[in-house]
Amino acid sequence: MKQFNRTALHKAVVIAAVSIAPLSVSAANEGAELEEVIVQGAPVYRDRTPSVSPELEYDTEFFQQFEPTSVGDMLKRTPGVAFSSDVGEYDSPQLRGLGAGYTQVLINGRRIAGSSADRSAAVDRIPAEMVDRIQIIRSPSADQDSQGVGGTINIILKDGASLQGGSIRLGVLSFDDNKYRNSAALSYGAQTNDVTWSTSATFSERYVAKQKTETVTSPEGELDTREIEHDVRDSDDISLSAAVTFQLDENSTLGFSANKVITERTENQTEEASEVNDDGDLELDGLARDAVDIEEDTLTLGTLYTQKFGQSSNWEISADYSKTEQTEDADLFERDDYESIEEYDGIENLDISDEEFIVATSVGTELNSGIALKTGLVASMKEREETYTEFDVESDGFVNGVDLLQTYEVEEDRLDAFLLGETALGESGILELGVRVESTDRTIENEVSKTDTSETHVNPSAHFSYEVGDRGTFRTSLARTVRRPAFTELSPTILEDEPEDGDAKQGNPDLDDEVSNGLDIGYEQRILGRGIAGFNVFYREVSDVIEEVGITRAGGGTLYSYNNAGDGEVWGVEMDFNVPISDQTGFFANVTWLDSEIEDQFTGETRRFRDQPNYVYNVGITHNIPSWDVSTGFSYQQQGKSLQVDLDREVELEYDGNLEAFIEKRFDNDYVLRLTGTNLLDAEKREHFTNYGGDSAQEILDNHIAGDVDEFEDEVETAGPVITLTLRKRF
């Protein structure tokens, strides 16, 4: 009976959202103080920032009606953002579909320390409640870090000026396996004549229960093995934030900020493996269970001083510190059948510490000629240590000692300098020219080796915008960007069972940075009063692309490393529409067509960049009914197939689309009760592996090039719908 009621509830959310037509994106009065909580009528859309460079900006009102839990849930609705996460999770965003390491994530314009080795940020740990707006920076100016080849995501947190009062949120999440989780948030901010301050606290419970079915078949299509996995991931996130800014006098300010995110996560995975016996029937081959406990703490501290000189000059200096510590403990169990006693198969531990300190200063002035200049320096010091331990464990769990200990340490110091100039060209044009010099010194070492490297990049940029009439804007942009290698790509430590069981992987400390020369050309048009339509084409020429390479056969698997595989090209078309259908109804859609080209170092054939889907799109409609104080709507996200090519396999990845819907009721202009649903179509993640075998790396490669398949493997991962009931109040 419970299952019937849950299914009926899921259907009711969909029916409620699509039966009240027409529907709209977000309905709140632009600029109103109650936008954060109360939906009032006119649709709210994205806008561009004042920057001459191509940037999109989305306020929290664009996302809030769908009650996103995290920044990851928010970003899946923005143009060109893809994910390669497990189904139901949105952790590391991929702008323009490129791997997560190609996307730079900033908090309030600053880099933050993180546990990810590829320098990406796990945005699913950043609660949506803390966010004021999100900027998508497609091409950077010289005063912005050049790290993002695919682009930069800048997450602006709420402060006292944006809050202007308090809000409280209580929520309960329902899952299709009859589990429930809670969430709560409290924030308050105020602004007086000389002090602006804010504080917030958020607690959220994230939960994903997945099932994966893996089947291995022969080239002739005969079933060989089947494995069924049940994977439950349960997270508790506590986020605390505070900021205060003092107006020292009419020309100077001093601000302080602090953020703390604490995550406790468990991952419990059970596996049931079966193989085909001589009679052609599936026979149980073994059972396994992994119990993983993860604790991750992130602390960020910042201070900013600004000083104006006269009417045309200003100076600012800032200092930011961030540190992330992660501990991951895994107990591995196995047994032959359901009647056997479960025995320990292994105990593993992973410790990561990532710390960064950044000091920056800049001076801006406007000359009498009308030219605005800005120059600055940024110095940063980063330290990272990663230790992996495997224990020698008996079947009863008794630990004899350490079986394997692997560690590496990285020290990375950067000194950046930039010069930026902007001037008007006629009455309608603005030209911005800049150059940024980034110098990096890096030391990476493990138990047996130590390597020092140094690289300097001169990254010019040029941006031009031109107003076409009262409603149109044309933009063109040229910029050089950089992708620095992931720390695991640099570490000489050999990692066992990567990327698959039996394989091994070793980094290459002599890797060069990837450098990209990029072009963006775009046009946007204001339509129907508050609507906007944007069109952008982009091209990236990327040199020294870093990819995995199989270097030798190791035991029963392959030893992989990394090299600068050569040069590649990335291009695409981005379109987004945000159109008011009526005063109470709006429509939004964005679609990005993606393509790329690089010569595969294994096969010699031309292919796309790894993990890049061929398209990403979003579409949504919501509708407001003022007489009932009710709003409703839906959104749908979909990304195309992507391909990954390794020495011994080719992997095709595909996701089903994600349907979300909401219906809300407002009371007394102070309360909002909102029912939302996500993954309402039970989306699947599908991976198709074409595996090639051989007794040596060269034989595997020969079979790969010849198309001599050893086996096919298919993995299908599913997770159920999530229903959220939320009550909000503004005070």
Image (cartoon, helix red, strand yellow):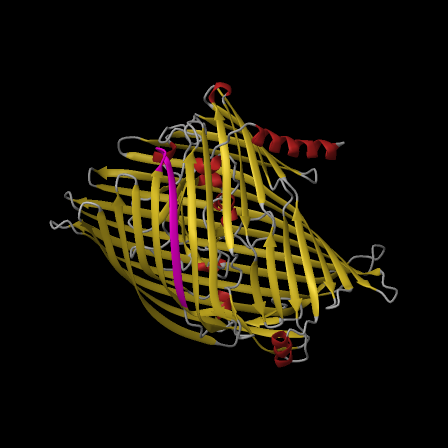
Report x, y in % for residue 82.
Answer: 51, 52
Residue at image x 59%, y 69%?
Answer: 405
Q: Is 541 within the magenta?
A: yes
* Quarter occupied by residue 581: top left
- The answer to whether 586 appears left or right of 344 in the picture is left
Quadrant location of the N terminus in the rendered image: top right
Quadrant location of the C terminus in the rendered image: top left
Going by the picture, which residue comes out furthest to the left?
Answer: 368
* Quarter occupied by residue 730: top left
- The answer to whether 316 appears left or right of 397 in the picture is left
Viewer-nearest residue: 133 or 318: 133
Question: Does 393 sit above or below residue 468?
Answer: below
Residue at image x 46%, y 45%?
Answer: 590
Residue at image x 52%, y 36%?
Answer: 66
Viewer-nearest residue: 24 or 432: 24
Q: Is residue 362 visible?
A: yes
Question: Does 435 sit above or below residue 547?
Answer: above
- The answer to whether 720 appears left or right of 139 in the picture is right
Report x, y in % for residue 640.
Answer: 55, 54
Q: Is 625 within the magenta?
A: no
- The answer to whether 443 appears left or right of 276 in the picture is left
Q: Is residue 486 visible?
A: no
Q: Main secondary structure of the magenta part?
A: strand
Question: Does 172 sit above or below residue 206?
Answer: above
Viewer-nearest residue: 76 or 108: 76
The magenta span reads 527-542
Report x, y in % for residue 121.
Answer: 47, 53
